[in-house]
Image (tube, rainbow, N blue to C red):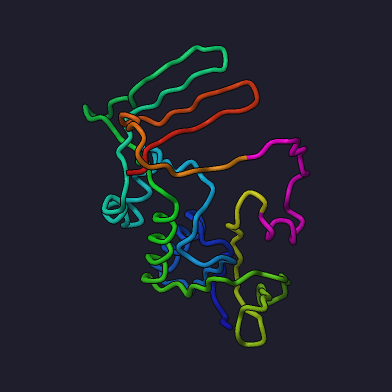
């Protein structure tokens, strides 16, 4: 399949944003992800106010505001020792900026569809099984691809997350740290008291909990 100018592995916010920008500039872009969208993703479900300039450049800011969300104008933090602080986001040009409580379930699908609309070739449920670099660029192997299970691209972008299989396959991953006995989980709950427009982080002796309303 191809050849493409650029193949991007990982269709989360980073991969889809790159695909939108590159496809809009006329590059032939392939965007691959091992999962099917929409999908749930372990995440804090919070968009920082600093993200708005990028979202506006991508042309998705208004579309994001049409998704289920909660406007967030400040944060509250507490320590395991009982100290607590709360503050609103600083005024910018006389206006209070806001972030969003927004589920990745909605955000990721919107960005992926935007990339496809801009001309990127999207392949969902496509797990990369091999990478090889040659004089003509990259050969990407996957049992989920047509054309003999291979794709050709001049450039490769690994946007496949913290444990990036692309980085590991290319020997670019850092040393593996000790994971210890830590774990993370996420839950979406209904019928609880609203969080009054802030994102909250509460520390306790063995970790922390983050809370935000997602609308």
Farthest front residue?
191
Q: Main secondary structure of the magenta part?
A: loop
Q: Is residue 96 left or right of residue 13?
A: left
Residue at 73% in and 53% down: 172
Of 46 and 89, which appears nearest the observer? 46
Q: Position of residue 50 (x, y in %)?
A: 39, 38
Q: Position of residue 187 (x, y in %)?
A: 49, 43
Reply yes or no: does residue 159 show up in magenta.
Answer: no
Q: Inspect this view and state whether residue 139 appears.
A: no
Farthest left residue?
94
Reply yes or no: does residue 170 show up in magenta.
Answer: yes
Residue at 44% in and 55% down: 105
Q: Inspect this view and state whether residue 181 appears.
A: yes
**Residue 208 vertical placement versus 130 (above, below):** above
Residue at 50% in and 55% down: 40
Residue at 58% in and 57% down: 159
Magenta extent: 164-183
Of 93 and 106, which appears nearest the observer? 106
Q: Quadrant of residue 126?
A: bottom right
Q: Quadrant of the N terminus?
A: bottom right
Count the numbered circles shown. Answer: 0
**Residue 4 vertical placement versus 183 (above, below):** below
Of 128 and 21, which appears nearest the observer? 128
Q: Position of residue 57 (x, y in %)?
A: 34, 53
Q: Position of residue 130 (x, y in %)?
A: 72, 71
Of 61 and 27, which appears nearest the observer? 61
Q: Quadrant of the C terminus?
A: top left
**Residue 204 vertical placement versus 5 (above, below):** above
């Amino acid at each position: 399949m191809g050849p493409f100018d650029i193949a991007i592995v990982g269709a989360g916010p980073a991969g889809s944003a790159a695909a939108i920008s590159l496809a809009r500039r006329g590059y032939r872009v392939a965007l691959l992800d091992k999962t099917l969208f929409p999908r749930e993703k372990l995440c804090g479900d919070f968009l920082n106010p600093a993200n708005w300039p990028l979202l506006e450049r991508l042309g998705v800011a208004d579309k994001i505001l049409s998704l289920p969300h909660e406007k967030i104008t400040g944060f509250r933090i507490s320590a395991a020792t009982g100290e607590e602080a709360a503050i609103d986001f600083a005024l910018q040009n006389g206006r209070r900026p806001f972030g969003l409580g927004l589920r990745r379930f909605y955000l990721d699908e919107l960005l992926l569809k935007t990339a496809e609309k801009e001309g990127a070739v999207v392949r969902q449920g496509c797990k990369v099984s091999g990478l090889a670099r040659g004089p003509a660029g990259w050969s990407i192997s996957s049992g989920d691809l047509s054309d003999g299970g291979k794709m050709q691209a001049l450039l490769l972008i690994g946007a496949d997350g913290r444990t990036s299989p692309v980085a590991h396959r290319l020997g670019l991953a850092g040393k593996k740290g000790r994971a210890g006995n830590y774990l993370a989980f996420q839950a979406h709950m209904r019928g609880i008291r609203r969080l009054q427009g802030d994102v909250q982080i509460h520390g306790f002796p063995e970790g922390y909990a983050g809370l935000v309303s997602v609308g």
